Amino acid sequence: MLYYDVDPEECRQLPKILKPDEVADFLCIHKNTVYNLIRRGDLPAFRIGKCWRIRRKDLSIFANNNS
C-alpha cells in the first residue's frame, strides 16, 4: 500500500502523540485502515488503557518509508 510522501515540516505541526482518527485524516485513509496497519505491525503504536496512540515520529517514518 502506498502513501503520499509526508513533508517533514507538515509533520512537525502535528501533536507529538496522535489518535488513530487523526492519523487517518493526515494520511487521507479510513480509520479502520490505521487499525489494520497497527494490528499488522506496519505502524508502531502503543495503548493507553483501551485507546491506541501513535507517536508523530513513528508516523513520519512510516509515511516516508511507504511512499
Image (spheres, rainbow, N blue to C red):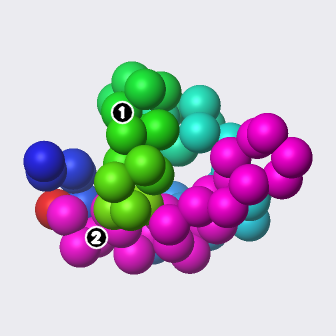
Give me the residue at 21% from left, 50% from top: 3
User: Regarding mark 1 in the picture, which secondary structure is present there?
Assistant: helix
Instruction: Name which residue type carries label 2.
Output: Asn
Locate residue 62: give its quadrant: bottom left
Give me the residue at 38% from left, 62% from top: 41
Relative image position of residue 44 (x, y in whole percent) = 50, 66
Give me the residue at 34% from left, 54% from top: 40
Q: Nearer the viewer, mark 1 or mark 2?
A: 1
Locate residue 55: give its quadrant: bottom right
Instruction: Tell me the distance, in whole angstroms, between the alpha carbons under discs 1 and 2.
Output: 17 Å
User: Regarding mark 2 in the picture, which secondary structure is present there?
Assistant: helix
Q: Is residue 61 magenta?
A: yes
| Above or below: residue 12 compared with residue 26 | below
Boundaries of the magenta span: 44-66
Locate residue 32: give its quadrant: top left
Residue labelled with disc 2: 64
Relative image position of residue 43 (x, y in whole percent) = 42, 61
Give me the residue at 23% from left, 73% from top: 65
User: Would residue 4 be found to the left or right of residue 46 on screen?
Assistant: left
**Label ID, residue 1:** none
User: Would residue 38 be found to the left or right of residue 51 on screen?
Assistant: left
Relative image position of residue 2 (x, y in whole percent) = 13, 50
Instruction: Name which residue type carries label 1.
Output: Thr
Residue labelled with disc 1: 33
Does any portion of residue 9 appear in the rendered image?
Answer: no
